[in-house]
Image (spheres, helix red, strand yellow):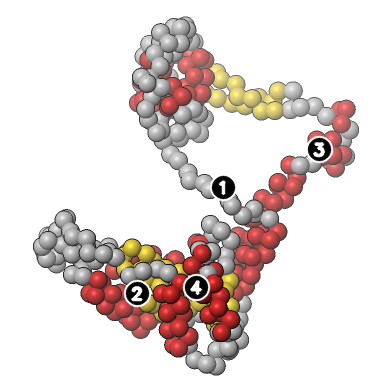
């Protein structure tokens, strides 16, 4: 569908206040609502659409930018958000408290906390030509075209106190491979460690019957799952980020065997200078306080208006509905193409 035109909206007469109002209104709507096949507005397309709909005969993108800036609007930006499957309630906060305690409290000499996860679909991507190292006035040169020769999955555990990493690679990602990884971790950790807390996400592979049976035979392993969509609490994700940047920024491995060997080499080199990530109690406290504040606001929103007034010691009959409404002031003779907008707020009863 083509963008809406002046004929579509009836050719309404334009005035300066109307231009401002329609500009802000249009910026607060999706382009598809005006028949424009765009994901987001920019100043030029807003200016074009204002002209197309007959709001104004001419307006520059700089004028649109000033109007939007005055109203603190940036429709070309976006922010991702996620509807939580798990409510942010008291149970959620308690789970976060447990994780924060595991990360920050002083452990006994018989305790250990490991963060576990999988980095999937790691491809060798052998290039059609050899990768050329950097030269004076030349960066590293990488052949663009590559072959597909399969992929590996990396199972990794990050020790939150020492920073040491335990790793295992496999072509498949099932409970069988996960148990093999757990067996390797079990053999690598001394028997004097009688309690190993494993922080890992909520995928089915981590909760399957085979894994439950293995846990029953290895009582020193205790699984601690963070809330759904809170994998960022898992510290191994930070280590995966380092691995991605330092080892897979340029991917060129002959085959799966070489890829697995190079991953193991990276883990060995990391462990030679391993260090934990700084996770302080203050960081966890701020996180918890933020959710508690949101819970408090949600609880406060359920109170009736009369109850809120009584809490403030004011009579409901004498309470007035005050609101802030924008008042636009313009010079009548200002050229709309280069106008500057002045806006203030008036208290209206």
Q: What residue is rendered at 46% in x and 11% in y? A: 9
Q: Do the numbered discs 2 and 3 sit on residues whose CB atoms are within 8 Å?
A: no
Residue 212's label in the rendered image is none
| SS class, disc 2 | strand
Q: Residues within 10 Å of mark 1 (few under 14, many from 20)?
A: few
Q: Is residue 311 visible?
A: yes
Is tag 2's residue or tag 1's residue first in the polypeptide sequence? Answer: 1
Mark 3 vs mark 1: in front: 1
Q: CA distance from mark 1 to mark 4?
A: 25 Å
SS at mark 3 in the image: loop
- Direction from residue 344 to residue 64 in the image, left or right: left
Give the mark nearer the N terminus: 2 vs 4: 4
- Examine the rendered structure and indicate whether residue 264 appears above or below residue 72: below
Q: Which residue is mark 4?
A: 115
Which corner quadrant of the image does residue 249 belong to? bottom left
Q: Residues within 10 Å of mark 2 (few under 14, many from 20)?
A: many
Is any part of residue 239 visible from this angle?
no
Judging by the rendered image, the residue that carries numbered circle 3 is 304
Position above or below: 231 against 165: above
Residue 162 locus on image (x, y percent): 47, 81
Q: CA distance from mark 2 to mark 3?
A: 58 Å
- Asked where in the image residue 36 lies, by quadrant, the reply is top left
Q: Which residue is mark 1?
A: 83
């Amino acid at each position: 569908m083509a963008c809406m035109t002046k004929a579509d909206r009836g050719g309404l007469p334009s005035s300066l206040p109307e231009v401002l109002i329609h500009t802000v209104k249009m910026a607060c709507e999706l382009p598809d609502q005006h028949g424009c096949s765009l994901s987001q507005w920019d100043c030029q397309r807003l200016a074009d659409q204002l002209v197309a709909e007959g709001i104004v005969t001419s307006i520059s993108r700089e004028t649109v930018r000033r109007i939007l800036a005055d109203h603190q609007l940036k429709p070309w930006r976006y922010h991702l958000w996620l509807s939580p499957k798990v409510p942010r309630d008291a149970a959620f906060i308690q789970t976060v408290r447990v994780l924060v305690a595991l990360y920050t409290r002083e452990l006994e000499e018989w305790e250990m906390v490991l963060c576990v996860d999988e980095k999937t679909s790691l491809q060798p991507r052998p290039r059609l030509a050899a990768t050329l190292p950097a030269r004076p006035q030349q960066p590293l040169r990488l052949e663009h075209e590559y072959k597909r020769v399969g992929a590996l999955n990396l199972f990794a555990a990050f020790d939150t106190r020492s920073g040491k990493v335990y790793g295992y690679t496999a072509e498949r990602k099932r409970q069988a491979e996960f148990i093999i990884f757990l067996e390797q971790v079990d053999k690598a950790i001394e028997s004097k460690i009688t309690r190993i807390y494993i922080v890992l996400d909520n995928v089915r592979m981590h909760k399957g019957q085979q894994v439950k049976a293995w846990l029953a035979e290895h009582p020193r392993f205790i699984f601690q799952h963070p809330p759904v969509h809170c994998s960022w609490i898992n510290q191994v994700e930070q280590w995966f980020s380092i691995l991605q940047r330092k080892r897979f920024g340029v991917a060129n491995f002959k085959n799966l065997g070489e890829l697995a060997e190079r991953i193991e080499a990276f883990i060995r080199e990391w462990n030679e200078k391993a260090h934990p990530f700084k996770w302080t109690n203050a960081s966890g406290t701020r996180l918890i306080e933020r959710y508690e504040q949101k819970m408090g606001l949600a609880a406060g929103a359920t109170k009736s208006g009369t109850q809120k007034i009584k809490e403030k010691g004011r009579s409901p009959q004498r309470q007035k509905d005050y609101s802030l409404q924008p008042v636009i002031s313009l010079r009548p003779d200002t050229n709309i193409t280069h106008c500057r907008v002045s806006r203030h707020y008036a208290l209206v009863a």
